[in-house]
Each structure stands twice: as structure tokens, then as C-alpha cells.
Image: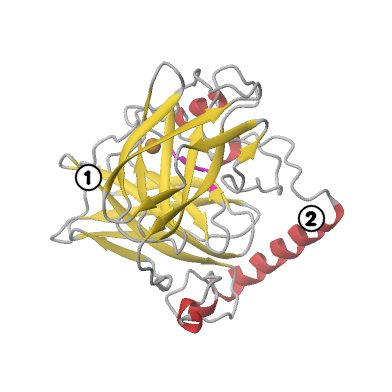
Amino acid sequence: MNTAIRVGAFGAGITLAFGAAFGVGRLVGPVGSDPEPTHHGSPADDSEAGGAGGAGERAEPAGEPETPGGLGISERGYTLAPDRTRLPAGEPTDFTFRILGPDGAPLTGYTESHEKELHLIVVNRDLSGFQHVHPELDADGTWSVPLTFEQAGDHRVFADFTPSDDPAGGLTLGADIAVTGPYEPRPLPAAERTAVVDGYTVTLDGEIEAGVENELRLRVADQNGEPVTDLEPYLGAYGHLVALRAGDLGYLHVHPGGEPGDGVTQAGPGITFHTRVPSAGTYRLYLDFQHRGEVRTAEFTVRVDGSDVPDDADAGDAPDDHQH
Ligand SMILES: [Cu+2]
């Protein structure tokens, strides 16, 4: 509705201009070629996160958005191999999987990123039921994590990791998991600039344009509406943000702007991120933040581009029109 993330008349013109340039570039250049993907998790990223600067220091070629991660179960010779791809809804399960390396053997060597060797994101394909967990690795290369899929439906799991001996850096693989049980797909919530979780209100500032570096600023207020200035570090940052593209669940890499203890970054109420959004469309953002010992997730629907598509039609699925 009118709460969509819009950039105003002047900004919208710029957005369209970028969008047009991007379209031409894609027509001329090979689609999907991504000469220097900067994945979160590469050593280069870690040094970037330490500097408060951000945008200008990034090694990505200007105007060339990175391809979303997580669209493939295999990439660069690595394959995400879940032990089971069919699991029941509503029951605790032990979710196990391996990352098979280019030699076909389970990968056992990983480089930590954001304090973990692998981040597992789980979400229903209707973009509900988001979970961000950290499985344990055994000596044979099997990852395991207790998981409960609250709702039935096709789910996507994303493994975000960095092989320790690969100069190309980190990558994100995605696999589908069928969660069995009665399923009623939920429509994507409308685009809004505020999200409420457990009484905390999180506000999203910043303009989002396709094809350029975007700075996203989130502000956290507590149950009394007071700005939170004592956010706690979680995985080496004051917030972690995952962005998924509605329609195909493309996984965007989002980089925190600064980190706790760098002398610049404050413990709230503002949290800054940088990301490149590869296309116009609708995205779901998931912000994990920690306060008073608890991690919470604030979720936003964001529309990129000043498109006139109605909210209920741009989620890709338009669930209300397809009920049987
Ligand atoms: Cu993680």
C-alpha cells in the first residue's frame, strides 16, 4: 500500500534510470557471470566490517550487482546434501546434512565468518517461519542441528559458509525441504517501515535501489518506545540481516556497517548495513538483534522500485488467488 518503501518522485526517477542501465547491462553482458562476487564470509569482508566506512571500500565493480546466493543446490563444485528432504511439521527433528566438496567428499575444513563456520537459514517458501541457526560439525563432515518446522509447506534451507582452502571465498547453497502436513500458504505481509517483535519497534530507514550499493539503517526502540542504546553483540555485530527475494528466494549478502569495539559503532539505537539489491521486486528482510540476553528477529517486506504493482500481487505467488 502507501507504506511501501518508496523513494519519492525525484528518487524514483533515479531508480528508474539505474534500472534501465542495469537492464541494458544485463542484455549486453553475460547473465549470471559474476566476476568478483563478494560473499559475506570472505576474509576481505571481515576487514571491511572492521572499518566504519563501508560502501566506498567494497571491492565489487560499480554498477554490477552480485548474483543472489542460495538459488542453487550446487555451485563451484560444492553441493548441499541434506540427509532427509521430507520432514514432518511441528515435531522436533535432528536436521543433518553435508557439504560435498569438488572431490565429492564431505567438506570438513571451513573458515569462520561472523563467529561461525556455517550459518543455516531456514524459511518456508512463503517467506514465513524464518530461522537462523548454527549446526554442529562432526569429524566426518556431517552437520546437525535440532530443528522444528512449525508449519507445513515447501521450505528452503540455505547454508552460508566459506571453504577453508578456496580462494574464491564464501558461498551460499540452497535446498528444498518438503515439510509435510496441511498447508495454507500465507500472503506476504504488506511493505512497511516498522516491525514490532516482542514489544520492540524496529524502524527501517534508507532508500533501496536496485543495482547500487544501499545503506540500510534500522533503529530499535524498546517496549516503552525509548531508543535502545545497549544492544548486545551477537555473532560479532549488533545486528544480522538476511534478505530474501520474493518469488525465487534469492539470498542477498548483507554486510554490517562496523562492529562492536571498533571505536565508532554504537550499541544502538541505529544499526547500519550495506547491501546490493540485484533487481527490482519484493524482498523480505530479517533482522536478528540481541538485547537483554535474547535474540529476536524483526521482519520487513520491502519493495524495490516505484512499481505500481499492487501489494497482493507482487509477492510472486498471490496466494489468495490460488486457493483451492
Ligand atoms: Cu548465523
Sequence-wise first label, 1 or 2: 2
Q: Identify the secondary structure beneath mark 2.
A: helix
- Using residue 200 as the reference point, say whether residue 31 is left or right of it: right
Image location (x, y in percent) of residue 178: 45, 55
Magenta-drawn segment: 252-257
Image location (x, y in percent) of residue 73: 59, 42
Question: Does 305 lie within the magenta span?
Answer: no
- Using residue 199 as the reference point, say whether residue 43 is left or right of it: right
* Rendered view: 287 above or below 141: below
Q: Nearer the viewer, residue 275 or 150?
A: 150
Residue at image location 53% in from the left, 27% down from the top: 162
Q: Is residue 41 visible?
A: no
Question: Does 256 lie within the magenta span?
Answer: yes
Marks 1 and 2 sit apart, C-alpha to C-alpha, by 43 Å
Of badges 1 and 2, the one in the foreground is: 2
Within 10 Å of the Cα at label 1, are there few (<14), some (14-19), or many (20+) other Cα atoms?
Answer: some
Contact? badges 1 and 2 (CB < 8 Å): no
Q: Amino acid at mark 2?
A: Arg
Q: Most extreme residue toward the left, as rendered?
A: 224
Q: Nearer the viewer, residue 300 or 18?
A: 300
Q: Nearer the viewer, residue 268 or 149?
A: 149
Mark carried by residue 26: 2
Q: Amino acid at mark 1?
A: Thr
Q: Identify the secondary structure beneath mark 1.
A: loop
The residue tagged 1 is: 229
Image location (x, y in percent) of residue 165: 59, 16
Q: Main secondary structure of the magenta part?
A: strand
Residue at image location 60% in from the left, 25% down from the top: 101
Task: Give the quadrant of residue 193.
Answer: bottom left
* Rendered view: 180 above or below 316: above
